[in-house]
Image (spheres, rainbow, N blue to C red):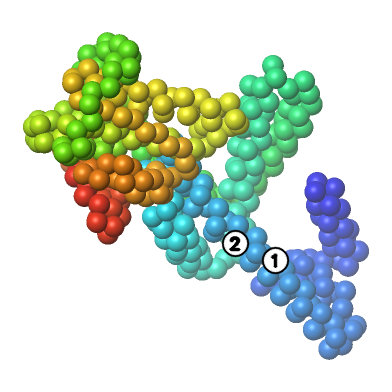
């Protein structure tokens, strides 16, 4: 691939020199090149120029398609790592797969409108951002080969290749920024920097929320002290009583408070408890069979701790764990089977309630539980959302 690209670029540069191509207003260098080549061909030459330019446009259209399709997926991975609102992680909810493409299209139209379709500015905007991407990807690969150096014998060769790529792309990026700073480069840096700042603010908000959640973790000390030997206890399943099916996300204060709120609000109405956790395979842990195995073990461990704690309180409890790429999709797929086993089941989920709710907290939190409620509602599955104050 590198050789073919280098051959194409060098060939174009030599052709520019041979046919004395110079910039002309409203035309690309390739358009000028083919006009110079076919200048004496008459009508056939004019038609060939148009065929060439249309072919280039179609190729660029196909290349842009990758961005429109994979851009929302990148947003999804960033959302799973809390750099963007978590609602972007729900691939099955069409927000990312369909609406994400629509939003990217609107953003592209807005960019063209605001820049007046200036190719001069758009090329600078594209060049700087694409080389930022190249630099980050090469840096990530260098970091990867350094981390696996104990397991890969030829790590230094592969690391050297990516290291050279990192140096070259960084040099090109710096050169483009310096040379084109007054030709739109500074605007590009402002736009890209603003998006980075927004992502950092979102990440900070989620980290602050995680610190607030420690206030809910008072029960965890008591629950953590429960011996997992309670897993061997099997209180009798009461088929006449209702079953509370709790959706949990890790062994934490949120899940424990949801469990106790069910008991506090409904008394002895629910004597059977089923804890369900769905492990999400995302960019953070999809790094091979070993990491996937660790994810499965962690999910099972979390569910077992809930089950042991519930049994220590004298309740029948069972834990179920699933692994998938999307919480909503996995929940929809597996919930009918769960309800077949527990026909008197009612699904419960916890909702965080902030001391001072704002548009930011509403936008960044509690999307998954409401989406599940809407989807289960359409299928006739009862779903109760319990408020959990932090």
Residue 196's disc is none
Q: Position of residue 17 (x, y in %)?
A: 88, 61
Point 24% across, 56% down: residue: 380
Which quadrant would the C terminus be assigned to in this image? top left
Answer whether labels 1 and 2 touch (C-beta < 8 Å).
no
SS label for mark 1: helix
Q: Which residue is mark 2?
A: 65
Q: Position of residue 226 (x, y in %)?
A: 27, 13
100 vs 36, nearest the viewer: 100
- At a point 33% along the width and 14% down the height, the residue shown is 228
Q: Earlier in the sequence, mark 1 or mark 2?
A: 1
Crowd rating for badge 1 (residues with CA inside 10 Å; few <14, some 14–19, many 20+): few
Q: Is residue 240 visible?
A: yes
Q: Is residue 360 visible?
A: no
Disc 2 on helix, strand or loop? helix
Q: Which residue is mark 1?
A: 59
**Left or right of 107, for residue 366:** left
Foreground of the two, 114 or 253: 253
Instruction: Tell me if 20 is positioned left or right of 71 in this view.
Output: right
Q: Residues within 10 Å of mark 2 (few under 14, many from 20)?
A: few
Give the residue at x 66% y 72%: 26
Give x and y (percent) for residue 33.
82, 69
Return the residue nearer the eye: 223 or 148.
223
The quadrant holding residue 151 is: top right
State the image coordinates of residue 359 (x, y, percent, origin top left). 23, 47
Separation of marks 1 and 2 at Cα, in angstroms = 10 Å
Q: Residue at x 42, y 42 (%)?
A: 79
């Amino acid at each position: 691939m590198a050789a073919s690209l280098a051959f194409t670029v060098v060939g174009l540069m030599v052709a520019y020199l041979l046919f004395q191509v110079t910039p002309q207003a409203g035309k690309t260098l390739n358009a000028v090149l083919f006009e110079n080549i076919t200048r004496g061909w008459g009508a056939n030459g004019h038609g060939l120029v148009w065929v060439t330019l249309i072919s280039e446009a179609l190729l660029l259209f196909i290349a842009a398609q990758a961005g429109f399709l994979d851009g929302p997926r990148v947003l999804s991975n960033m959302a799973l790592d809390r750099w963007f609102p978590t609602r972007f992680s729900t691939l099955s909810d069409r927000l990312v797969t369909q609406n994400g493409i629509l939003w990217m299209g609107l953003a592209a139209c807005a960019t063209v409108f605001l820049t007046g379709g200036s190719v001069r500015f758009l090329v600078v905007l594209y060049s700087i951002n694409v080389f930022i991407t190249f630099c980050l990807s090469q840096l990530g690969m260098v970091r990867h080969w350094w981390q696996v150096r104990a397991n890969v014998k030829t790590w230094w060769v592969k690391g050297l290749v990516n290291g050279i790529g990192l140096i070259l792309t960084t040099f090109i990026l710096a050169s483009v920024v310096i040379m084109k700073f007054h030709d739109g480069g500074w605007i590009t840096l402002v736009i890209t920097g603003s998006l980075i700042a927004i992502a950092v603010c979102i990440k900070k908000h989620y980290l602050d929320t995680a610190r607030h959640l420690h206030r809910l973790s008072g029960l965890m000390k008591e629950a953590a002290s429960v011996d997992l030997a309670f897993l061997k206890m099997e209180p009798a399943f009461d088929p006449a009583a209702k079953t509370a099916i709790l959706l949990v996300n890790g062994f934490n204060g949120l899940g424990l408070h949801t469990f106790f709120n069910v008991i506090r609000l409904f008394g002895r109405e629910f004597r059977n408890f089923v804890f369900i956790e769905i492990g999400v395979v995302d960019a953070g842990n999809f790094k091979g069979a070993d990491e996937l195995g660790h994810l499965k073990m962690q999910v099972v461990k979390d569910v077992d701790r809930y089950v042991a704690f519930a049994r220590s309180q004298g309740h029948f409890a069972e834990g179920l764990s699933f692994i998938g790429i999307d919480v909503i999709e996995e929940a929809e797929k597996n919930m009918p089977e769960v309800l077949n086993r527990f026909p008197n089941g009612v699904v419960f989920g916890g909702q965080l309630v902030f001391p001072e709710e704002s548009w930011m907290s509403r936008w960044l939190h509690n999307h998954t539980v409401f989406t599940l409620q809407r989807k289960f509602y359409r299928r006739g599955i009862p779903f109760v959302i319990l408020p959990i104050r932090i």
